[in-house]
Image: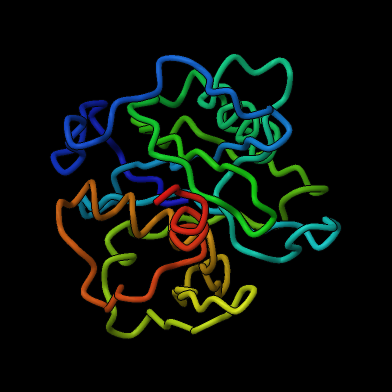
């Protein structure tokens, strides 16, 4: 982790008013088809916003070895999406809920297994207080990346055209090198971070987004005309 010192104040680029309001109550979706991920943001050494990411364990049956945000499916004990994201972050990487200030929930994304995945945005004000403890059954690496990179095309971004039941969609991928190794952030995680970065920085990505990603395709197909 980038162990820069922070003053505990909100970062100058995290405009809370720019986020859609958090849901005030659960929808009628069944819990077994609902999940949440934590977009945990902190300020780096140069004042840039960074986001915590993990690499999923090869022991997992679902998406082993993929880069992901901390998170998972909703449990019966979770009162809302924020509770799900914070619980999963504690279980996966030892990030206690007392260290994270939740600021917003974004609109749900649809995963490849058709889960409704709610991104929960949280701020880690004192990164020096976070001592990662990895659950090796779920995670085999943790790293952080600059949030702004998910808006930039040059050097890191690639886009693959894929197909689902005859419908074409975009799969965005970002290559990233760090002290912890080389990683590729792609699929749903990339789509979520593109969206979050667009809101926080109040600008569109520099790359083409004319082709829908998988989640946008699913919403298009399921929304009544």
Residue 164's quadrant in the figure? bottom right
Identity of the residue drawn at 24% across and 55% down: 198
Q: Nearer the viewer, residue 156 or 225?
A: 225
Above or below, 198 relative to 7:
below
Q: Nearer the viewer, residue 74 or 134?
A: 74
Q: Position of residue 137 (x, y in %)?
A: 83, 48
Is residue 12 visible in this depiction of the protein?
yes
Identity of the residue drawn at 49% across and 84% down: 160
Identity of the residue drawn at 45% across and 35% down: 120
Could you tell whether 22 is left or right of 178 in the image? left
Q: Nearer the viewer, residue 171 or 94?
A: 171
Counting every numbered tag in the picture gives 0
Is residue 126 visible in this depiction of the protein?
no
Q: Position of residue 163 (x, y in %)?
A: 58, 79
State how the image is colored.
Answer: rainbow
Q: Position of residue 112 (x, y in %)?
A: 64, 59
Could you tell whether 194 is left or right of 133 in the image? left
Q: Nearer the viewer, residue 181 or 170?
A: 170
Identity of the residue drawn at 40% across and 15% down: 24
């Amino acid at each position: 982790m980038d162990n820069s010192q922070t003053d505990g104040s909100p970062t100058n680029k995290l405009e809370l008013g720019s986020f859609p309001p958090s849901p005030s109550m659960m929808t009628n979706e069944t819990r077994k088809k609902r999940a949440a991920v934590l977009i945990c943001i902190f300020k780096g050494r140069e004042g840039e916003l960074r986001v915590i990411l993990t690499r999923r364990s090869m022991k997992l049956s679902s998406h082993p070895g993929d880069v992901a945000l901390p998170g998972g499916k909703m449990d019966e004990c979770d009162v809302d999406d924020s509770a799900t994201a914070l619980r999963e972050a504690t279980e996966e990487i030892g990030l206690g809920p007392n260290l994270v200030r939740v600021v917003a929930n974004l609109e749900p994304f649809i995963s490849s297994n058709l889960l409704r995945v709610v991104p929960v945005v949280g701020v880690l004000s004192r990164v020096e207080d976070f001592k990662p403890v990895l659950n090796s059954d779920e995670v085999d690496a943790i790293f952080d990346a600059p949030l702004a990179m998910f808006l930039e095309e040059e050097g890191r971004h690639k886009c693959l055209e894929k197909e689902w039941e005859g419908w074409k969609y975009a799969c965005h991928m970002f290559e990233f090198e760090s002290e912890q190794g080389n990683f590729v952030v792609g699929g749903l995680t990339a789509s979520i971070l593109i969206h979050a970065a667009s809101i926080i920085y109040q600008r569109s990505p520099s790359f083409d987004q004319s082709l829908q990603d998988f989640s946008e395709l699913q919403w298009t197909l399921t929304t009544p005309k």
